Amino acid sequence: MTPVELSRTVLRAVRRAVDEGALSVAVPERVVVTVPGPGGCGDYATNVALQLARPAGQPAHRVAEILRPHLVGEDGVGDVVVTGPGFINISLRGAAEPVAALVREIREQGPVYGHGDALAGQVVEVRVPYEARAEVVADALVRIVAAQGGRVEIDHREPVNLRPVPAPEDPAPLGPDAARWALLHPAAHDRPRITADHLVQREGNPLFRVRYAHARTRALGRNAARLGFEADPGEVTDLDVRDLVTALADHPRILTAAATHRAPDRLARHLVTLADAVLPFLPAVLPRGEEKPSATHRARLALAEAAGTVLAGGLSLLGIDAPDHL
């Protein structure tokens, strides 16, 4: 069961609870499942009970307990445990292991992994001032909202409804990619820095880390081909990849939030989180010394390539190039 399939399973459980009168809430359009956080257990977790608690007029833990029996009987679900204030932790049964399932999902969807229909049929009117940063943010929103099934209409009529803090100077000398990053990475209420730091190829530059992480994943694929093996999704149990898997699984939720809140900075910062999670993992992907390529190396490579795919897709939505060589 992939995260998308499990999300639909949780959504069906909510609908059944509502149909039976156990919950009185509007059924959400989608439910996000992620890798369990600290204190969690199982293969995946969802905070849907916390989201429904207020409209249901019940404590989140009680909402989770109402949903639990509706999930236990589902095909592919082995166990359901409620932890903390109301997190629902799900263990899978008779299905692909969680890391392999997530990687397969990303490989199947490619750069459109995380795209959805949260804004299907909606027209988002974006009114911006004639100012460089506002124009760049609006341009990024066109792609981000479209990735969630909506459409953006941009105009400059008053009153404006999107006015990020303007750049202190013209960002054009940074070049198109660094200029866009400088304007999109900070939150709308923060003043962007227009400095040459965005061009420096070192760890202190978030844009460099994101693009470098993508380029390294592509280089690993080329080097693996020279060694005579390809990626094959599987479980990576010998290394701690929890932060990496969490960042990948969280990508659909981040895209939805960036679209609904008109905040491309959320996507930009998420790409930095993903890059910082994958970079320490990359040196362990290929065989070392006299090692022969094994199933473990193929699984590691598949996970690394999945991260590269998500990084490239995210940069594309921001209008920034993701070079294969850096």
Image: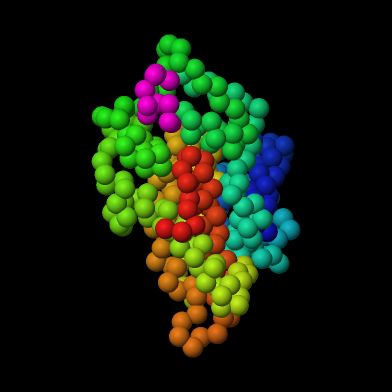
Q: Position of residue 69 (x, y in %)?
A: 66, 52
Quarter of the image where one finds residue 19: top right
Residue pictured at 45% horizontal, 68% vertical: 282
165 versus 17 height, above or below: above
Q: Residue furthest bottom?
A: 290
147 versus 229 height, above or below: above
Does the magenta run of residues contain 131?
A: yes
**Where are the magenta residues, as a range?**
128-137
Residue pictured at 61% horizontal, 75% vertical: 229
In screen coordinates, is 149 left or right of 19?
left
Q: Position of residue 142 (x, y in %)?
A: 53, 31
Name the foreground residue: 280 vs 76.
Answer: 280
Quarter of the image where one finds residue 176: top left
Residue pictured at 42% horizontal, 16% vertical: 160
Name the foreground residue: 28 vs 232.
Answer: 232
Q: Position of residue 131 (x, y in %)?
A: 37, 22
Residue pictured at 51% horizontal, 21% vertical: 154
Quarter of the image where one finds residue 243: bottom left
| Quarter that holds the C terminus | bottom left
Q: Residue furthest top?
A: 158
In screen coordinates, is 266 left or right of 13?
left
